[in-house]
Image (cartoon, rainbow, N blue to C red):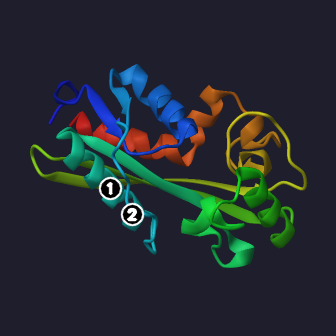
């Protein structure tokens, strides 16, 4: 398989932040990212693992469009909470919780300075060949004592990445800095590396 064989991918998400971030990450290698067409209903995220949630979404988009599709499920794990919120990161404070509500709950329940880990499971499904693969990316860090920064989304304003080293949250990094160390960036680079074999 080569990169020429895949010039565009359907992204199985309704999250505009993820669409923008993944399109930005794949653009330099010549892969365009197409939004999920209207009318395609994604399966609910009821799996016990990130992979369990990502694969059905990619399969649904690939089957509905007849084209290669990707889907990610990602979230944050707090060591002090035994890995919670994990796969329930997007609905940590309730089924219709906002990013703000989820972040506030995490900051109430986990102590500042405690270890965190972002996890991304990225599923690739090609309906033409029947190929399915899942790629993983991780980013370790710790919980900030207060929210800082206006970039990113989700838990980024309180996530201090270990790798950055100068006490900035993910929301204070530039897009380029974040992409270089983020869980999603790492999973996507694994996908690209595999496609280029």
Q: Residue at x 81, y 70 (%)?
A: 110
**Quarter of the figure that contains the N terminus:** top left
Q: Residue at x 58, y 58 (%)?
A: 75
Contact check, label 2 and label 1, Cβ < 8 Å: yes
Whether residue 120 can be seen here: no
- Can you identify the residue that label 1 sits on? 134
Q: Position of residue 176 (x, y in %)?
A: 60, 27
Q: Residue furthest bottom?
A: 82
How packed is label 1: few (under 14 Cα within 10 Å), some, or many (20 or more)? some
Nearer to the camera, 117 or 36: 36
Nearer to the camera, 162 or 42: 42
On residue 19, which mark appears? none
Q: Position of residue 133 (x, y in %)?
A: 26, 54
**Quarter of the figure that contains the C terminus:** top left
How packed is label 2: few (under 14 Cα within 10 Å), some, or many (20 or more)? many
Question: How far apart are the two marked residues, 2 and 1, measured between alpha carbons?
Answer: 7 Å
Q: Residue at x 67, y 67 (%)?
A: 92
Q: Residue at x 16, y 29 (%)?
A: 5
Please state if 158 lies on the left or on the right of 37 as rendered. Answer: right
On residue 51, which mark appears? 2
Please state if 174 lies on the left or on the right of 135 as rendered. Answer: right
Q: Residue furthest left?
A: 129
Lower position in the chain sequence, tag 2 or tag 1: 2
- Mark 1 residue element: strand
Q: Residue furthest right?
A: 146
Q: Is residue 85 above or below residue 160?
A: below
Q: Is residue 81 above or below residue 11?
A: below
- Mark 2 residue element: helix
Q: Position of residue 118 (x, y in %)?
A: 60, 56
Q: Position of residue 71 (x, y in %)?
A: 38, 48
Whether residue 139 can be seen here: yes
């Amino acid at each position: 398989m080569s990169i020429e064989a895949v010039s565009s991918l359907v992204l199985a998400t309704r999250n505009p932040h993820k669409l923008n971030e993944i399109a930005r990450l794949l653009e330099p290698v010549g892969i365009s990212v197409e939004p999920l067409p209207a009318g395609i209903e994604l399966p609910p995220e009821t799996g016990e693992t990130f992979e369990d949630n990502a694969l059905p979404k990619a399969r649904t988009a690939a089957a509905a469009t007849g084209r290669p599709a990707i889907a990610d499920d990602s979230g944050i794990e707090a060591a002090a909470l035994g890995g919670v919120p994990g796969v329930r990161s997007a609905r940590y404070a309730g089924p219709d919780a906002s990013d703000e509500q989820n972040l506030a709950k995490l900051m109430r329940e986990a102590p500042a300075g405690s270890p965190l880990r972002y996890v991304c499971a990225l599923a690739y499904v090609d309906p033409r060949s029947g190929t399915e693969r899942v790629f993983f990316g991780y980013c370790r860090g710790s919980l900030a004592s207060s929210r800082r920064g206006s970039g990113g989304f989700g838990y980024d304003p309180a996530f201090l990445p270990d790798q950055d080293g100068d006490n900035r949250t993910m929301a204070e990094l530039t897009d380029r800095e974040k992409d270089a160390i983020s869980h999603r960036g790492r999973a996507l680079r694994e996908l690209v590396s595999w496609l280029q074999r």
